[in-house]
Amino acid sequence: EDPKLLEAFEARVAADEFIEPKDWMPEAYRRTLTRQISQHAHSEIVGMLPEGNWITRAPSLRRKAILLAKVQDEAGHGLYLYCAAETLGTSRDQMIEALHSGKAKYSTIFNYPTLTWADIGAIGWLVDGAAIMNQVPLQRTSYGPYARAMVRVCKEESFHQRQGYEIMIAMANGTAEQKRMAQDALNRWWWPSLMMFGPPDADSPNTAQSMRWRIKRETNDELRQKFVDITVPQADFLGLTVPDADLKWNEEKGGYDFGEVDWEEFYSVVRGEGPVAKERMEARRKAWEDGAWVRDAAAAHEAKRRERKAA
Ligand code: ACO
């Protein structure tokens, strides 16, 4: 690679300029961005499944309408992100093939089952809450199409977080059984939510370079700490207990100390051994196959339209 081009690129990044699709960029920058954006897109798409599981069983028409809208938003985020990744030169078909063949990663969080309605509250509150914490800084990521995608995505995620927290408020202030369900959902989703931020900085192979290229603007541990600091008082407000015996306010650092995430569990879920990983991939592949006729029909329609135009 031409050292002059590299120098100019790094100067632009250092000046907080956006890099755009047709600009020169180091191959490693293109590769790591394609990796991160495509994993992000896959996460949005696979992320529809745990909640989709409850659309037909939402407890009221109002809840159903909200959940339906939220799950549709996630589909939109996924498609938007695939478009952003495509501008780096990998086709959507290649990315989807990588997901369906099990080669591509997606967020560990979506490999856990949604057992009760309270899980839908906990996902909005914790999972979307963690997603926002991670995505707000990405609005200033150095790659223009990714940064712009994040602006819209974050607006919608913040609605998702609020709808989840509102479900938690209703459950936590409901009957004793509802409150028990809310606590149980918090117990099961807390640690997997902390895992969403990725491995500790010391064990994160990509963080240092991604921080230098301003792809990432904050590290995994920084974001995890911020998430804990914001979320613990929200749990207190609900009258629920965060399932961590080591959780303690640390006056000196102005944040919470918290227990060690089970990193063995994290790595096993990353390897595809999550509790419902197999079901998730089967559901995605089935949706893809079931939708083949729609793609074929759209392509045939487009071909006919072009023919008519040419005639
Ligand atoms: N689930 C699955 N894989 C993960 C997770 C996770 N929670 N955390 C880290 N990994 C993977 C990384 O993708 C990386 O794999 P790879 O090198 O084979 O591609 C490996 O573990 C090592 O991690 P890091 O070096 O820390 O990787 P990175 O710098 O990419 O940081 C992070 C990971 C924080 C997830 C980053 O990619 C990111 O910010 N992505 C955008 C946000 C996103 O994808 N959110 C998805 C969930 S939110 C939602 O969809 C609603």
Image (spheres, grey):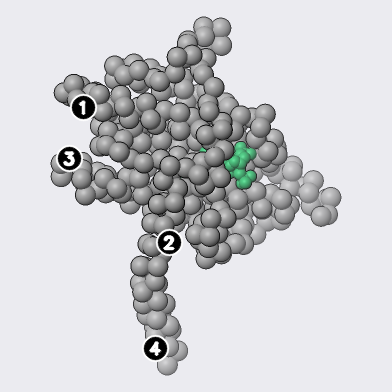
Q: Where in the figure is residue 225, as x and y percent of width and height? A: 52, 23
* Mark 2 neighbour density, 10 Å: few (under 14) some (14–19) many (20 or more): some
Residue nearest the viewer, comparing 169 with 30: 169
Which residue is rendered at x = 40% and y = 52% of the image? Answer: 279
- Residue matched to label 4: 308
Tell which circle, 2 or 4, labels the residue nearer the N-terminal end.
2
Tell which circle, 3 or 4, labels the residue nearer the N-terminal end.
3
Tag 1 and tag 2, C-beta contact below 8 Å = no
Which residue is rendered at x = 58% and y = 27% of the image? Answer: 221
Amino acid on which the number 1 mark rests in the picture: Gln
Q: Give the Cα separation between the discs numbered 3 and 4.
A: 50 Å
Q: Give the Cα separation between the discs numbered 3 and 1.
A: 12 Å
Residue 123 occupies which quadrant of the picture? Answer: top left
- Residue matched to label 3: 59
Q: Give the Cα separation between the discs numbered 2 and 4.
A: 35 Å
Tag 3 and tag 4, C-beta contact below 8 Å = no
Q: Where in the figure is residue 178, as x and y percent of width and height? A: 21, 27
Which residue is rendered at x = 53% and y = 55% of the image? Answer: 102
Mark 2 vs mark 3: in front: 2
- Residue matched to label 2: 285
Q: Give the Cα separation between the discs numbered 2 and 3.
A: 29 Å
Amino acid on which the number 4 mark rests in the picture: Arg
Mark 2 vs mark 4: in front: 2
Mark 1 vs mark 4: in front: 1
Q: Give the Cα separation between the discs numbered 1 and 2.
A: 35 Å
Residue nearest the viewer, comparing 221 with 2: 221
Amino acid on which the number 2 mark rests in the picture: Arg
Tell which circle, 3 or 1, labels the residue nearer the N-terminal end.
3
